[in-house]
Amino acid sequence: MQFLSRRLALFLVATLALSLAATRGSARAAACHSTCTAQLAECKRTCPAGGQARRDCREACAERSTCTAPGARIRTLAYVVNECTTDPQGQTFGLKQKLLVRRGNCDPVSVMEVPPLSTPVPDRGGLSGGLCRIYGGYRVGLWSQVTGVFQRMAALPDSSGVLFEVTSRVSIAPAFTAKPPAEGIFFVRADGRSPPRRVSDASRFPNFLVVADVNSPIGVSFNGAGGAIAVSPDGRKFALIDLGPDTAGNEAPQIYLLDLRSGERTQLTHQSRVLGESDPGICCIGFLNTRTIAFLKPGEDARAFQVETDGKSPEKEIPPPTLVPGARIVPQFKVSGVNPNVLYVVFPDRLAVNAIPGAEPVDELFLIDGHNLVQLTNFGRNDTGGGLIARGRVLFFASANSTGKNPDEVCQLFSVNESGGDLRQLTHLPSDGRPSFGCRASWETQCSISGASQDPITGTVLFASSCDPVGRNPFGEQLFAMRPDGTGLRQLTATRGLTTDPDGTLHVEMPGPFTYAGQGRD
């Protein structure tokens, strides 16, 4: 089960075209306090004077540090820390949330905090421990969007700032959701030295859809709908999906373009597909360039379109690529550029070797470059996805054991060249002994990866995972960073996950959602 729906039969179109240009000034981090740097230096001072013991000690210090490794520099990372507590009597104060922005190895800066409820409410969620227990049991931090107030986020391509959306109107459990200090879409500078500036109203279009799920302890799951904020390559405009009138005046999901400085809104589409139980009506928006946005209309007759950002031009259908008979293209939520692009393809007539109820067909990745179509994967599984192109290689996630280094079929990050060759397993996340759902996060199952991003300038790979590769994440999900070849893995966050006190008090603390000044998959 995925937070982002990958069961819709959709056509992929090239989306994000992020600017790779960044000035020297924006690339250099200003002087700041760095607790992780001080702690790393202190740890190394305790090491022996010389020899192999000293080298081993210093390496252990680095692996335990939340500083990134040399060659894995990060620019602007924004993430939410969510805390939920249920007392022994089953009472909770809901989610306490805090948005942090981190530049490089500088200490994260708190941008906005949402306190918990002032009066406790019964935490009933369909099983012992209620909503807090369910949230912690899934170990996917970004699912805080279901009952929390921080929704869509996006970092500007040059890493100078972050856009984030705050609203309590889309929560599935309003009594459980705290009131934020303000609602809307905000912009904050990456250094956090000035307060967030409100740009616009929040979208009324939900970030997720509630769908039936036999694998869920509460009988439902949450599939992605609204998607992320799409930022123009020059960082001056952004687009999102909101509800608005079609040509007949009826309300339906539409694409809106917003000016980052003035907040001026321009409605770009007037389509009539309405929001359904498992159909968002419209999805997967992304800038092809500063003047053109691509999007998808889902359904059995899924089609790709583009629309100009002037607000005056009609939508134009994009002819779909031709694939092998029986294959269907589904949306790739963030890709690395206009050409070439990665296609996420479903084969409904093929049974996956790791089929589970609701996820039986085979998924594979293809690369389309002009008129050339290249198959990148041939795993025969149902959880291969992603597809970020950088430095001549395609980064993706899968639970395959094609390299012989993943016998427990844990969700890992891999890369291949653009011809589909030279397969490399970049991560070696350890099994935690739970039943495996591969890269499909589900209730109390094997650890997984729930998000990945790659910096187009530094090459650094960031991802969220509930696995424990460095021995500091036994109970939840954390953010990690590594070099593009998979070395230099570091755990960037240190939240407590799901823990229970001797008196029965239950605590959950996890990061998510997160956004990074680069390309990514949600």
Image (cartoon, rainbow, N blue to C red):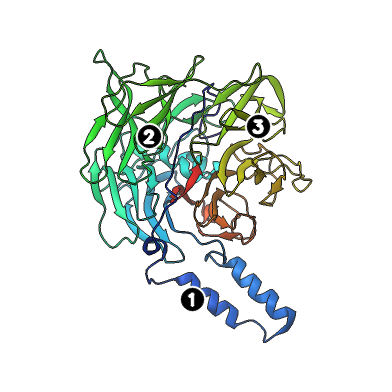
Q: Is residue 86 visible?
A: no
The residue singled out by tag 3 in the image is: 374
457 vs 398: above or below? below
Residue 213 vs residue 186: left or right?
right
Name the quadrant of the N terminus: top right
Q: Looking at the picture, how far across and down is residue 42, in whole percent?
A: 54, 79
Dividing the picture into quarters, in which one does residue 369 lie? top right
Looking at the rendered structure, which numbered label has been put on residue 173?
A: 2
For badge 2, the amino acid type reads: Ala
**Helix, strand, or loop for circle 1?**
helix
**Helix, strand, or loop for circle 2?**
loop
Q: Looking at the picture, how far across and down is residue 494, in whole percent?
A: 51, 60
**Residue at left 32%, top 53%?**
113
How far apart marks 1 and 3 lie (CA) works out to 48 Å
* Furthest residue in direction right, as rendered: 404
The residue singled out by tag 1 in the image is: 38
Dot 2 alpha-carbon crowd within 10 angstroms: few under 14, some 14 to 19, many 20 or more: some
